[in-house]
Image: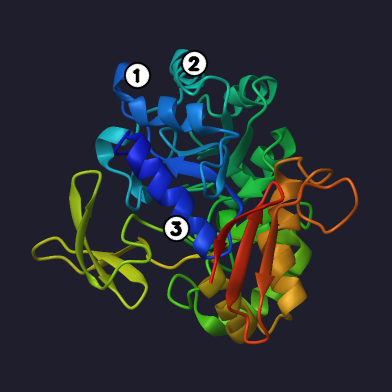
Amino acid sequence: MDGTVESMEAVGRTLAQHGTTAYLATSMVRRQISANRHLELAAERVGRPDGGAEVLGIHVEGPFVHPHRGGLIRPDRIWPPDQADLKGILTVSKGRLKMMTMAPELPGALELLPLLSDAGAIGSLGHTEATFQEARVGFGKGIRHVTHLYNAMRGLHHREPGALGAVLMDHGVTAQIITDGVHVHPDLLRWTVGVLSPEALVLITDALPAAGLPDGTYRYDGRPYHSVDGSAWYREEGKEPRLFGTTLLMDDLIRRAMKLMGVSFPQAIQMASLNPARTLGLERERGTLEAGRRADLVLWDESHQVMETIIRGKTVWKK
């Protein structure tokens, strides 16, 4: 949300060092459309590696999410679904919006899906209080992806399975997962692979600007957070600390996926490459090592450490 070229370049360089060749620039939306320079800038960086990971497009979490499930999203970044507002977001994103996290239970939310689809973007269920039935209606209307599974959504109950139950029972949905072992309990991570299979899971970092930096206190969107051993926590006086995100990057989360989920290295790589490519409809150009695919490659050593990152056939980082 800095809205500067220098910040975007720093993100790209850092991601490349940790094994990411391309990514969705994920952020929030400010209510005053003209105040979203960060989205304009991210749109302008699409397709320009600049010595680091390439921006594929934009993913916004909100603003059409449930206020009780906002997580790190500030209350003033959340408001009811509105077609005019979505058109404004699409305009400021210069046609580069690729994903919007939304709560399907909100009045008017599902009516936005055709507009998103026409713009080349997908709706992702997240930050939601949706019931089991409301989530299933959302899937039937075109939502086929889920933002950070288990987190910021109505949980599983034996009489009301909730949004989580709908995801776990609908095997046509792909779901993001954070494999730090904090956002989701390690035993639950391992169980989830047995329910949804590695093909349905998409590794994400949920990384904040402190990713790759030492433990300490940082700020995001005007609020301080504490980075401790890869996890970010937000503390309000008199309240329990809240999990704010991670400060981990993709190579670490691939290694943790292997350790905590019990998946193989090729399976973890697929969750970080081919699966997200399929989610975005890019599997014909990205995500596999085949003739005709883009020469976006990451070389690893036998201990699963990144040795070299190649983007468009050019080395952008080497250990």
Residue located farthest toward the left when viewing the structure as drawn: 237
Q: Quadrant of residue 263?
A: bottom right
In this orientation, does residue 194 appear?
Answer: no
Q: CA distance from mark 3 to mark 1?
A: 29 Å
Quick check: marks 2 and 1 in contact, CB under 8 Å?
A: yes
Q: Amino acid at mark 2?
A: Thr
Q: Nearer the viewer, residue 251 or 111?
A: 251
Residue 14 is labelled as 3
Q: How is the image coloured?
A: rainbow
For the N terminus, the image quarter is: top left
Q: Nearer the viewer, residue 136 or 229?
A: 229
Residue 33 is labelled as 1
Q: Along the horizontal axis of the image, is 143 left or right of 94?
A: right
Q: CA distance from mark 2 to mark 1?
A: 9 Å
Task: Identify residue for label 2.
Answer: 91
- Tell me the mark number nearer the camera, choosing from 3 and 1: 3
